[in-house]
Amino acid sequence: LKYIQGPPVLSWLLGHEYELANQAEVGDLEFKWFRDYGTVFRSAGCCGEDILMVSDAEALHHILNTGGYRYPKTKDAVRFIRQISGRGLTWAQGVVHQRHKKALSPAFSESQLRLLLPLFQMYSEKLALRWRERFADNQIIDISHWLPKVTLDVLGSFDFQFGSLDDKASDLRVALQTMFASSQRPSKFTTLLRAWKRALPDSIVEWFEAVYVTEEDIRFKAYVDAAKGAARDLLDKNTSNLSANGEKITQESHDYLKGVEGKKDMLNMLLRSKAAEDPKKRLDDDEVLSQVSTMIFAGFEITACTLTWIIYELSRNLEDQQMLRAEIDAVREKRGDDAGLTSNDYDSMPFLNACIKEGLRLHPGVQFTTRKADLDDVVPLSQPVVSTSGEVMKKIPVMKGQRVHIAIAAYNRSPSVWGPDADQWKPSRYLDSASESKKQQSMIGVFGNVMSFGSGVRACIGWRFAVIEMQAILVCLLTQFEFQLPPGGLDIQTVPLRSMNAPMLRGKLDQGLQMPLVVKRRGRADA
Ligand code: HEM
């Protein structure tokens, strides 16, 4: 890759890896480098490794969509995922990934997820009730503290009963919330250790990890053990209730699904895949338990964080908040006050969905992901770049083994896709057919042309789940409350926290995730 331009390298040992992982504001360095060098550039890994940084639409499509399994996750990423969530879908590779996906996909189909809507609505209402019980009108509420309670309770409703909104104690919840307490910003030593683990044979790394156990390792294990333990209890309890055709008999805790034929919720799909006779669909015991730790880990906090960002943007852009509320009120009025809203109602609200897309675009929960070329390849570009010798390049040849940085956040802000206002909050870009963003659809991603849920064969399996959940929570909260920035405004900094881009108050990073907003009750819902 030497002929591709890139920022100067100040340290052969650390390359840009330490700098990138320790940026004050997430993305600052990448966004600047993509502006300076184009949609593809070369950055330095530790010990002289070259990394291909990619935000180009066609290149991303080639690697993630056309490439299928030819650009797998790197082996250190796979090992790390196994450590934090076990042998679940995010860990699986190639044919094993196909088998996992076949077993789980029915639980994430649109028709199945629509059945969960009453559940999402129930927990949203419970959150609104808690706010009314505990806070006076016009009080400041740290919404980043409350939203994860809803998204965790929703995931836990498959019988785990986290009870976050009821302040119930839960070992699993505590293990989950503290698992990254000692791994915020990697030190130089940790950066190098990770690089060596990437380069060394698996057997040596496994030996090393067995003798050198860090505080981080202990926390990860505590979470995986707690999640698998809870999952084992749950599955054992329900296996005895399995009817002859593999259908779980309705439990009291699944009242919301009572009477629904052919249920394909997560629990049922896991029970079925454990009992499946077809080896292409069967999951072993540990794989089944790992799906539970995987879904909880991958699903709850990132959805809450995205919602926090959306409500923050709506508080900074009060006209958009009013417009969205007017859209919601109009649909409610048409349906009649007592009728519950349906998924069709949510889908019929263009501005609601535009705000969700814009929140995901500007504040993607995952900043980047990494892949490795499994073959020698030529990657096409939609935006040519200029080489170190001044040549215009429309394609980049890559060698087998090349590490590729998939720059999710930088693609989402790429002016060549979104236009010159790519850095600004502007939900109307999805509605206005003349806008740059509408014209430049690049067929990437799974929702609204944004990369925030990934793309291709490894795209987020939970994206519909997250979208329906965000629709339900936003509609409930905006119906009952108005949100405003506190007097004097907020100085928010985007900080890498766990695997997310988290909002924190500048100068108060030690206080963790924060989004204190003035929450005003609306008259209608008080009635
Ligand atoms: C706003 C919310 C969410 C965002 C932004 C998000 C983002 C992502 C991204 C970017 C990936 C791909 C990572 C890669 O290519 O390396 C991914 C994968 C995944 N997500 Fe999500 N996610 C969200 C919600 C959820 C939810 C609610 C669940 C489960 C209930 C979930 C489960 C998963 C799983 C299991 C994978 C791995 C898929 C595979 O490898 O085949 N996610 N997510």
Image (cartoon, grey):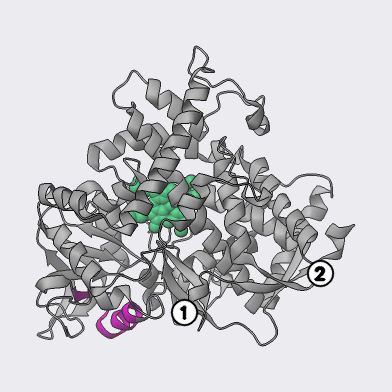
**Residue for point 64% across, 31% down:** 253
Q: Which mark is residue 360?
A: none
Amino acid type for the residue under numbered disc 2: Asp
Disc 2 marks which residue?
A: 137
Q: Quadrant of the N terminus?
A: bottom left
Based on the picture, tell me whether residue 34 belongs to the magenta stretch: yes
- Residue closest to the far right: 527
Amino acid type for the residue under numbered disc 1: Asp
Q: How many marks?
A: 2
Q: Is residue 455 visible?
A: no
Which numbered disc, 1 or 2, marks the residue closer to the eye? Answer: 2
Of callouts 1 and 2, the N-terminal one: 2
**Badge 2: how crowded within 10 Å, few (<14), some, or many (20+)?**
some
Quadrant of the rendered image containing residue 186? bottom left
**Residue for point 64% across, 78% down:** 317
Query: Looking at the image, do the residues carrying marks 1 and 2 touch, with CB atoms under 8 Å apart?
Result: no
208 in relation to 519, above or below: above
Q: CA distance from mark 1 to mark 2?
A: 34 Å
**Residue for point 26% across, 36% down:** 96
Provide the residue span drawn in magenta. 29-43
Q: Left of 79 or right of it: where is 338? A: right
Disc 1 marks which residue?
A: 423
Residue 126, x across and y down, in percent? 72, 50
Q: Left of 424 or right of it: where is 182? A: left
